[in-house]
Amino acid sequence: MNKVNIIGNVTKDLELKTSESGGTPYVQFIVALNEYIYGTKEKKAIFLETVAFGRQAEVLAAHLVKGSKIAIEGKLSTGSYINKNGVKSYSTKIIVEDFTFVDSKRAIS
């Protein structure tokens, strides 16, 4: 099973883009959340790359701004690419399957 559930804050305003191949709308954004360090009361911030497609992307781009809190249910997707230094790099992203706006003034999903 490949399922991820997170609640965090968007790190910057979203920009709706369109794929070159099929014209599908999408947004890529980062969600920040705090993670407790095992065995301590200390927290550290983690930043998760997230992507949504189609109608979900349009709704998210219209309603999320920097600092917005969101709950996301999705799946992990991994990939690789050659970075600008010519080195193969790996990435992991969360593909949005469902979401809920946690901010009370944005209570739609």
Image (spheres, grey):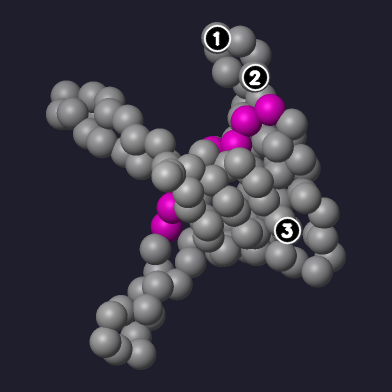
Residues 51 and 66: in front is 51
How many residues crowd around disc 1 within 10 Å: few (fewer than 14), some, or many (20 or more)? few
Q: Position of residue 25 (x, y in %)?
A: 66, 25
| 89 over 62 or under it: above or below | above
Q: Earlier in the sequence, mark 3 or mark 1?
A: 1
Query: Disc 3 and disc 2: Cα gap in Å?
Result: 23 Å
| 97 over 16 or under it: above or below | below
| 98 over 32 or under it: above or below | above
Mark 1 in CB contact with mark 2 (< 8 angstroms):
yes
Residue extending farthest front:
1
Query: Disc 3 and disc 1: Cα gap in Å?
Result: 30 Å
Residue 50 visible here: no
Q: Residue at x 26, y 87 (%)?
A: 39
Q: Which residues are magenta?
A: 47-54
Q: Amino acid at mark 3?
A: Phe
Q: Give the label on residue 107, or none.
A: none
Q: Position of residue 71 (x, y in %)?
A: 63, 59
Residue designated by label 2: 24
Query: Disc 1 and disc 2: Cα gap in Å?
Result: 8 Å
